[in-house]
Amino acid sequence: MGAKDRSNEIKVMRIYEAPVKVVWDAWEDSKKVAQWWGPRGFTLTTQSKDLRGGGTWIYTMHGPDGVDYPNKTKYLEVDRYRRMVYDHGGNDIQKPLFRVTVNFSEENGKTLMDMTMALPTPEAAEETRKFIKKAGGDSTWDRLAEYLAKESGNKEIFVINRSFEAPIDRVFDAWTKPEQFSQWLSPTGFSMKFLRSDIQPGGSTFYVMTNNTDITMYGRASYKEIERPHRITYTQQFCDKDEKISRHPLAPTWPETMLTTVQLAEEGPDQTRVTVIWEVYGAATPEEMKTFADSRAGMTQGWTGSFDKLEKALKL
């Protein structure tokens, strides 16, 4: 989740492409917060919300399995557009699990969200980290980025973050050295082989992925930016074995061209956060845009499987 100043704390830092007022409003307005709060697949019903010191937010999280999770957040401190402190994870029959401090600051029209979750003990913090990872809790902050892109620029994007216990240069190499990239990028159950690899600005790749039974997919990527060690952008398309543009074999209405932006940030000497932003590039039909917007759960599953493989590779 991020570098830990003290072992009983969990840190989350995100930079959002929106002014601090827009970000704050997304937290404050019950209708807006319902668009992004919680892991992917969850929905939210607010019974009451009073965002001020001493106020409470009473809401219910509805899981994709139909289970309801009642919550009662107690706000201890609220400094509008700057800071909030609240107790999280409690309800009428359960004490809060941890205390959250969130600081907001703006620079050049972007908002830094700096969050600290304080738990009673290092052991409780470690268990919470495991729970958040298993439950996909970090996707809450990815969903916020997607909501803000839609709210501020009417733009559909997909965002996923993951922190890796490895130096930033090591992680950057895993994205830019073909022999490393091919070991982890493909979905779970698939293997990948580069038929051509020229990973540099203006360069391109051509590759094949297969599950070694009934599915074989070809694709190509064209690199636009590579700024070591913080940023990589490339477009990608599905194609046939002769490198002619085609469509996803299992999703014929998937957009023809996607733009991938990879951002790497140091969270400590041996901790790197990777942010992947996916968006449609070039012309797309309304049906294709809807297919993209409706596929975020599947994209999360696919990237999570790839990131699990990357995590293992970085430990070798």
Image (cartoon, rainbow, N blue to C red):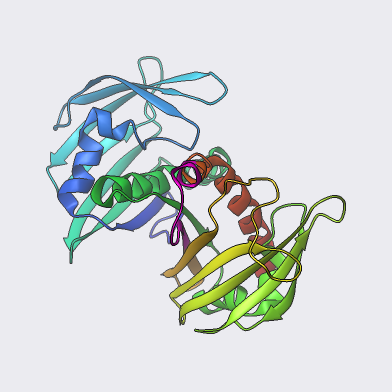
Residue 118 located left or right of residue 178: left
| Residue 32: quadrant of the picture | top left
- Specify the segment rendered in magenta: 275-290
The quarter of the picture where the C terminus appears is bottom right
Residue 105, percent from left and from top: 19, 57
264 vs 300, nearest the viewer: 300
- Indicate whether 153 appears above or below 27: below
Q: Where residue 169 sits: x, y (%)?
A: 53, 79
Asked if the stretch drawn in magenta spans residue 159, the answer is: no
**Residue at 46% in and 56% down:** 280
Q: Position of residue 60 (x, y in %)?
A: 38, 20
Q: Determine the residue positioned at 39% across, 49% down.
A: 156
The vertical placement of 270 against 7, above or below, is: below
Image quadrant in which you'd find residue 165:
bottom right
Q: From where the camera sits, is residue 273 visible? A: no
Residue sticking out furthest to the right: 213
Q: Position of residue 264 (x, y in %)?
A: 45, 69
Q: How many marks?
A: 0
- Left or right position of 140 against 180: left
| The one of 100 and 171 positioned closer to us in this rendering | 171
Q: Nearer the viewer, residue 100 or 22?
A: 22
Asked whether residue 72 is in view, the answer is yes
The residue at 77%/52% (across/down) is: 189
